[in-house]
């Protein structure tokens, strides 16, 4: 088990022009009835007790009390029947297998999918498939096009040697651009996993290809999970569902070596878990739910809330005297020192350009549900440009304090400070309780060592910048 350094919980003065606000330590590491106070934790820790175990004992006790209120013999029998169901074990085995792409994270990241497809479609990369994967996918795309609209005949593609295919990523912002000189064919693939194409995006890419390859035949593909029809003439829709079918067939081909077979199988499995529905598993899940509705409803109600960690951190932040909540959004909790209402009164932005409060500098705690990552940032919003420049330059001059400052300065929002509270690599290895503990201790350490210096230095930099403006 990790050894934690107990953070400094002493009070830290926050000086302003007319008053002194004091940040007090957290009253309780785990707010709630009958949970251990921070003073109790410190006292027990001095006696040799384990901080993590004390915290977990408190959370577990609260959870047991909650579960006891809804326990019944009928519910216990329903849960036992679910656990004994053979199809439940089959579903658990299907979903619980190790998957290489899940281990790397970003299963719905367009960037990672595009990178992998570029690797797979490049005949000379070290995947052992030569041009086979590219050929199979292109033939599947052509199958969805009427014969008179196909830029190339399937037979011509089937007998072609694709070893000269050249795959480019993000050329002119195009996700995948594939040149096949031997066929005088260029393939454009615009990949959208979650977002939609922006206005005019597909038209711009089509114009680029037409201008750059006037003598080539052109195949323009819009790749989405469900094969959404593109809003631009000349494109053909292709789905990740169909892509998974092609790769599944390819992974079972007797001529394919074991290594690329495994790679393709893992990719197909990941697609069917996270990008497109796997009909067989979906039907199995529906049957299980119908048979064990009561047990599943109970389990669903007892699950940790996705934003539970963020809610815990919000409670801890707002227990600190002098810190106030700004307008927050899903997965982002914003807060600020109340004294900034006075000391940073001149550093405000339009209420329509960021938050409705108009504050120009805010702390944010961000939760990334897909990875479990939680981090704390100090963000500068869209202030007047001269003022933004001076505040950013002042922060850059103090790298000892403004850690994680993002360069270059953003056009509208700029991150001046960044601290990880729970990393994306650590989060999947911990259960919910330890995730919350890790993030809470990191916040307490930040509060005790970095919060006051940041607040005071921001005030000093902003005051100087505002004075120069006047």
Image (cartoon, grey):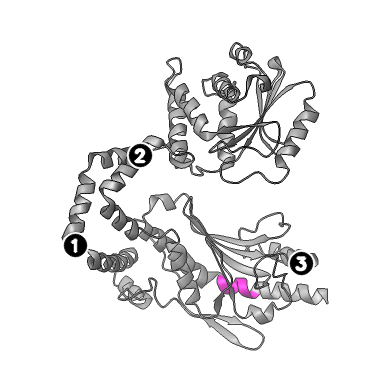
Question: Which x, y percent locates residue 85?
Answer: 22, 42
Which residue in the protein does label 1 denote? 72
* 3D distance between C-alphas at marks 2 and 1: 29 Å
Label 2: state its secondary structure. helix
Q: Earlier in the sequence, mark 3 or mark 2?
A: 2
Which residue in the protein does label 3 denote? 390
- Magenta segment boundaries in residue numbering: 451-456
Q: Residue furthest bottom?
A: 18
315 sits left or right of 343 in the view: left
**Which tag is nearer the camera, tag 3 or tag 2?**
2
Crowd tier of the residue under label 2, counting other residues whose Cα lies within 10 Å: few below 14, some 14–19, many 20 or above: few
Residue drawn at point x = 55 percent, y = 80 percent? 322
Question: Which x, y percent locates residue 75?
Answer: 21, 57
Crowd tier of the residue under label 1, counting other residues whose Cα lies within 10 Å: few below 14, some 14–19, many 20 or above: few
Disc 3 to disc 2: CB gap under 8 Å: no
* 3D distance between C-alphas at marks 3 and 2: 59 Å
418 sits left or right of 82 in the view: right
Based on the picture, tell me whether residue 70 belongs to the magenta stretch: no
């Amino acid at each position: 088990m990790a050894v934690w350094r107990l953070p400094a919980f002493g009070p830290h003065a926050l000086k302003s022009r007319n008053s002194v606000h004091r940040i007090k330590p957290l009253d309780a590491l785990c707010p709630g009835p009958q949970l251990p106070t921070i003073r109790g934790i410190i006292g027990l820790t001095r006696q040799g007790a384990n901080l993590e175990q004390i915290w977990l004992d408190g959370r577990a006790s609260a959870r047991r009390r909650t579960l006891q209120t809804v326990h019944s013999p009928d519910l216990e029998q329903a849960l036992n029947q679910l656990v004994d169901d053979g199809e439940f074990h089959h579903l658990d085995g299907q979903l619980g297998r190790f998957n290489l792409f899940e281990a790397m994270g970003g299963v719905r990241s367009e960037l990672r999918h595009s990178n992998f497809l570029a690797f797979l479609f490049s005949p000379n990369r070290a995947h052992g498939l030569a041009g086979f994967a590219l050929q199979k996918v292109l033939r599947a795309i052509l199958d969805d096009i009427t014969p008179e609209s196909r830029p190339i005949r399937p037979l011509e593609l089937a007998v072609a040697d694709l070893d000269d295919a050249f795959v480019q990523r993000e050329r002119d912002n195009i996700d995948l651009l594939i040149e096949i000189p031997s066929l005088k064919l260029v393939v454009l693939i615009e990949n959208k996993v979650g977002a939609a194409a922006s206005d005019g995006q597909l038209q711009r890419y089509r114009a680029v290809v037409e201008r750059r390859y006037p003598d080539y035949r052109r195949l323009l593909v819009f790749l989405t999970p469900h094969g959404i029809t593109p809003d631009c003439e000349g494109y053909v829709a292709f789905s990740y569902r169909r892509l998974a079918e092609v790769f599944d067939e390819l992974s079972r081909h007797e001529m394919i070596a074991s290594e690329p077979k495994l790679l393709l199988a893992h990719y197909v499995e990941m697609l069917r878990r996270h990008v497109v529905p796997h009909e067989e598993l979906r039907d199995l899940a529906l049957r299980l739910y119908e048979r064990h509705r009561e047990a599943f409803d109970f389990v669903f109600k007892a699950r940790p809330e996705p934003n539970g960690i963020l809610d815990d951190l919000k409670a801890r932040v707002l227990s600190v005297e002098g810190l106030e909540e700004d307008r927050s959004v899903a997965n982002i909790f914003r807060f600020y020192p109340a004294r900034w209402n006075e000391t940073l009164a001149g550093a405000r932005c339009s209420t329509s350009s960021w938050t409705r409060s108009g504050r120009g500098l805010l702390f944010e705690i961000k939760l990334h549900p897909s990875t479990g990552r939680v981090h704390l940032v100090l963000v500068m919003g869209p202030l007047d440009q001269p003022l933004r420049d001076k505040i950013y330059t002042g922060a850059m001059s103090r790298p000892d304090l403004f850690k994680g400052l993002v360069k270059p300065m953003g056009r509208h929002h700029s991150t001046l400070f960044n601290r990880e509270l729970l990393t994306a690599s650590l989060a999947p290895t911990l259960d919910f309780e330890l995730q919350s503990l890790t993030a809470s201790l990191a916040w307490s350490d930040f509060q005790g060592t970095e919060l006051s210096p940041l607040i005071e230095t921001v005030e000093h930099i902003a005051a100087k910048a505002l004075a120069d403006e006047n």
